[in-house]
Amino acid sequence: MKQVTIISGKGGTGKTTLASSFIKLAAKQIAVDCDVDAANLYILLNPSRKKTEKFIGGAKAEVTGTCIKCGKCEELCRFEAISDSQDNIKIDKLKCESCGVCEYVCPTNAIKLKPEEQGEFYVSDTEICPFVHARLDPGAENSGLLVTRVRNIAEDLAYANNKDLIIIDGAPGIGCSVIASLNGVDYTIIVTEPTLSGISDFKKIFEVTKFFNIKSFVCINKFDINLKNTGDIEKFCSENNVEVLGKIPYDEKVPENLSYKKIIIDDQSSKAGGEIIKIWDKLKSYLYS
């Protein structure tokens, strides 16, 4: 079984558009959305949920006993998550960083760190393949832990159903959820665009994949909006021995199809869709070799 993660240094580069197309083109696959902070692959795959489970993440401070309002916890909380109220102290869970200082200094043991529900994860069916995805509550932490949970479920599902390939739509950036989506995969596809911010963030995420010694490929989306910057990306890839699998042209058919929740390769008049099919054909030689 092979695993491939589609990532990008920044949001809006077309990562999910590419991932959804690969999922449609593949065979014997499991689809995974590891962008748990802002999941959107489900919009294109239109899943039917078979299983829903709560995600219990990190612990948060909570008043569970008698508070004598001594003020020690409020004084020592460096995150300003604790404030005085009429009856007991008040703890702002969005500000609480679960450091445990309040629990440690409380003379009456009135404060405890308690694990709390921070989201959900799902196992679903789609018309294409099984799909594992999740939703992290706004402001919640431990996105990396949730991504790891989602990937473990996908691997178990793949082995149980004799699937050969797991295609992962990763999160943008270089944070915890991205690192968790890269751990143990065979290949990564880095989607970038020829803008100054796109190039800068592309180089950052490339260094992450290089650190983990993962075989990486590059796709340049909307390459024709700035040919000079596209040339700079290609030069960087050549100097770092990274293969550019393809260059996708700017195509107004892409947002048009997305607005109808359609995967772009289903539109035979789309130039971008045609190039994505060519990119997939090149990637297949690595995935199924």
Image: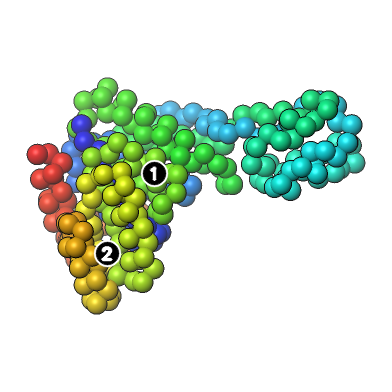
The answer to whether residue 215 of the structure is visible from this angle is: yes
Of the 4 image quadrants, the one containing the N terminus is top left
Real-space Cα distance between discs 2 and 1? 23 Å
- Relative to 170, is 27 on the left or the right? left
Q: Position of residue 195 (x, y in %)?
A: 34, 71
Of the 4 image quadrants, the one containing the C terminus is top left
- Relative to 80, is 146 on the left or the right? left
Task: Tell which circle, 2 or 1, labels the residue nearer the N-terminal end.
Answer: 1
Q: Amino acid at mark 2?
A: Asn
Q: How is the image coloured?
A: rainbow
In the image, 5 versus 240, the foreground residue is 240
Determine the image quadrant of residue 236: bottom left
Q: Position of residue 109 (x, y in %)?
A: 79, 25
Q: Is residue 15 above or below residue 2?
A: below
Secondary structure state at the residue bearing disc 1: helix
Residue at 21 percent across and 25 percent down: it is 162
Q: Amino acid at mark 1?
A: Ile
Determine the image quadrant of residue 82: top right
- Relative to 166, is 60 on the left or the right? right
Q: Is residue 147 above or below residue 218?
A: above
The answer to whether residue 42 of the structure is visible from this angle is: no
In the image, farthest residue toward the top:
160
* Residue neighbourhood size for the residue with mark 2, other residues' Cα within 10 Å, grouped as few (<14), some (14–19), many (≥20): many
Secondary structure state at the residue bearing disc 2: strand
Q: Position of residue 62 (x, y in %)?
A: 73, 32
Q: Which residue is mark 2?
A: 221
Q: Which mark is residue 179?
A: 1
* Residue neighbourhood size for the residue with mark 1, other residues' Cα within 10 Å, grouped as few (<14), some (14–19), many (≥20): some
In the image, 116 versus 22, the foreground residue is 116
Q: Is residue 47 above or below residue 20?
A: above
